[in-house]
Image (cartoon, rainbow, N blue to C red):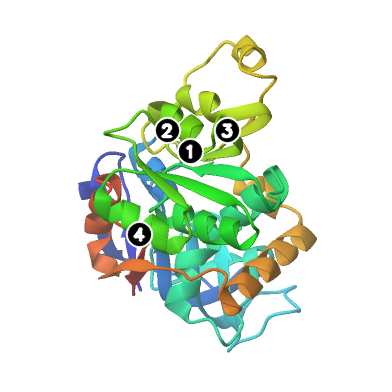
Amino acid sequence: MRAIRIHQTGGPEVLKIEEVDLPPPGKGEVRVRHHAIGVNFLDTYHRTGFYPMPLPLTPGAEGAGEVVEVGPGVADLEPGDRVVYAGPPGSYAEARNIGAQFLVKLPGAIAYDTAAAMMLKGLTAQYLLRQTYAVKAGDWILVHAAAGGVGLILCQWGRALGARVIGTVGSAEKAEAARKAGAHHTILYRQEDFAKRVEEITAGEKCAVVYDGVGKATFPASLDCLRPFGMFASFGSASGGIEAFDIGLLGRKGSLFATRPTLFTFMADRKRLETMAGELFRAVENGDVTIEIGRRLPLAEAAEAHRALEARETTGSIVLLP
């Protein structure tokens, strides 16, 4: 089968397509033939070594497809099942073996490409909106990179929960995408002081929570967007990691809370994963959340997918097709 392999860290050019052998699934594993593969910023962190991984590596943490074989000890899945997952690296391939604990059965109403584009991002939105800070009707919430894959879901789902959504974006085109997704207000962060605009938009009330997947470029100004006892939820580092800071800053700016949750910690409990996935599937099926796929590319063009993602040229999700 064909798979993308990384033999050394670096730019998108290190992503090479190769022929590889796939052994039979081991104990507790399932072989999935991919119909669609999700592309995420997490994959670029693995490629560059920002999050170090053993090499050689097949990147990719998200995919959707069909079960073709199950290993010993797998009782609740069988060949022909439609499945989707967010899990350990290995999805940039025509097929893979993966632990059954990561797989969730995919409702028939959700297409494979939609599923591959939504699982990691959608589960991230679920834990941010429903668990990290449980959004309530009337809350002001700030979503950075509101036209990105996670951002568009946060805008839609946040609005469906009754929140008043403010989104930061980098262009007028992305502002329009965020508004269509549910943002009540958008801020062009390259042209405006976003903390000042948040204060103006909220008439001084500021936000209950800031959802920040950008990192270095938006910190510490994000803290100035929060009301007393507000929550700063950092979930990504698209502009670089947030460096160490004086924790007393949280006290001086209003007894704030700050957290850096990760999806895989939430997913470690199987019952919690099933609850999260079920809530996401319902949100998509009932129309609260529509998954936008900005680009579909062949598996062999994974390098172009990474280049476009890092250049912030994309709106919505990128999907690779085997």
Crowdedness near tag 2: few (<14), some (14–19) or many (≥20) residues, C-alpha within 10 Å: many
Relative horizontal placement of residue 267, taking residue 165 as reference (left or right) = right
Residue placed most toward the observer, 28 or 159: 159
- Residue 33 visible in rendering: yes
Position in image of residue 94 (x %, y %): 39, 73
Which residue is the site of mark 4? 177
Task: Give the CA separation, mark 4 to mark 2.
Answer: 19 Å
Number of labels in the image equals 4
Task: Give the CA separation, mark 1 to mark 3.
Answer: 8 Å
Relative horizontal placement of residue 114, taking residue 273 as reference (left or right) = left
The kind of secondary structure element at disc 4 is helix
Task: Give the CA separation, mark 1 to mark 2.
Answer: 6 Å
Which residue is the site of mark 2? 197
N-terminal label among 4 and 2: 4
Residue type for callout 3 = Lys
N-terminal label among 2 and 3: 2
Task: Give the farthest residue toward the front.
Answer: 203
Which residue is the site of mark 1? 201
Instruction: Check whether the beta carbons of the residues at disc 1 and disc 2 lie within 8 A of each other.
Output: yes
- Image: 229 above or below 82: above
Q: Which quadrant holds the N terminus?
A: bottom left
- Image quadrant where residue 24 sits: bottom right
Q: Nearer the viewer, mark 4 or mark 1?
A: 1
Q: Residue at x 54, y 68 (%)?
A: 289
Residue type for callout 2 = Arg
Q: Residue at x 42, y 56 (%)?
A: 149
Residue type for callout 1 = Ile
The kind of secondary structure element at disc 1 is helix
Which residue is the site of mark 3? 206
Instruction: Check whether the beta carbons of the residues at disc 2 and disc 3 lie within 8 A of each other.
Output: no
Relative horizontal placement of residue 317, taking residue 206 as reference (left or right) = left
